[in-house]
Amino acid sequence: MEKEVLLRVKDLKKHFNMGKKEILKAVDGISLDIYKGETFGLVGESGCGKSTAGRTMIGLYDRTDGEVIFNGKDVHTMSEKERFQFHKQMQMIFQDPYASLNPRSTVKEIISEPMEVHGLYPDRKERLERIYQLLEDVGLNRDHANRYPHEFSGGQRQRIGIARALALDPDFIIADEPISALDVSVQAQVVNLLKRLQKEKGLTYLFIAHDLSMVKQISNRIGVMYLGHIVELTASNQLYKKPLHPYTQALLSAIPIPDPDIEDKRERIILEGELPSPLDPPSGCVFRTRCQHAMEVCAKEKPVWQEIDTDHFVACHLYNDQVGNNEKKDILVNIR
Ligand code: SF4
């Protein structure tokens, strides 16, 4: 069956002018398709541009260049009326449930607000019923409606944030690090809740996170981001079974494996150094300053984005037959 593209991102760039002729290239030309009903995970270290990418996709930031096509329309060239409708269809869940809920509003008011803005459920009684239903959908109950955010735990607050995001019955949700501020024990509960809601409501997710192990639990496909670029993109299982990009391999090697025999024997790849500044990114491959396989060509040429296996894309000179030398053959024998 042909998959339906709900969101298409084409060569999207978001640069910030920092003054004194300094340009911060937070997102520097990313492309991806997100299919209806799937969860697309976007992962990378903090500062890699993944949250900026999400915010530019939903139109919170203007783009510098490129396109964000949702349901056939470019988010950044929509009329005001179209943009208003678009915000009903695409919603966002934020990282910090503490900061994203107004402390002076009750849960009822928080969830009701987007409905009021969009003129939904004008009848007070019907709106209240809708709020109760949403609270139940996210594992809370109607008694919570008159309480304030500070009366809840972090996990419950994130549930309130999810209820608010669902209030307009959207098709697409951008979840920006929705579990990173929560205790590990609560993270799995929120991921399970998101999975259940996706099934029940036919939602599509962009799930942004820095923790690859949690992203695997929820994502159908994953894009790995490094310094404003997507360096690898494929199905979640494939990425874990056969990571190709040296950065993905390093990220995966940091995740502990529950089997002690395998865990003891495997070799860890230590990522040396910090993420370079996006104000002054390295020439050629942006990962080269931390890559254990970096070759001469990596400083001179930007690696091209290519499909290596079916639906498995990577940007790395190691996999480009046009850029070859003997040094590369030995590396490939060891890492594939
Ligand atoms: Fe490493 Fe070169 Fe591949 Fe970049 S292009 S990831 S530096 S081998």
Image: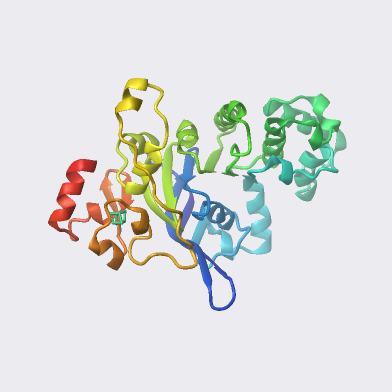
Q: Is residue 237 left or right of residue 40?
A: left
- Image quarter of residue 79: bottom right
Residue 44: image x %, image y %?
47, 47
Q: For the C terminus, which image quadrant?
A: top left
Q: Is residue 335 left or right of residue 273?
A: left
Q: For the N terminus, which image quadrant?
A: top left
Residue 231: image x %, image y %?
37, 52
Q: Could you tell me which residue is drawn at 37 percent across and 37 percent down? A: 253
- Residues 197 and 209: in front is 209
The answer to whether residue 80 is above or below residue 160 is below
The answer to whether residue 14 is above or below residue 274 is below
Residue 206: image x %, image y %?
52, 44
Q: Could you tell me which residue is drawn at 50 percent across and 38 percent down? A: 37
Q: Is residue 320 left or right of residue 290?
A: left
Q: Could you tell me which residue is drawn at 51 percent across and 58 percent down? A: 68
Q: Could you tell me which residue is drawn at 60 percent across and 40 percent down? A: 178
Q: Is residue 336 visible?
A: no
Residue 72: image x %, image y %?
51, 55
Q: Is residue 278 visible?
A: yes
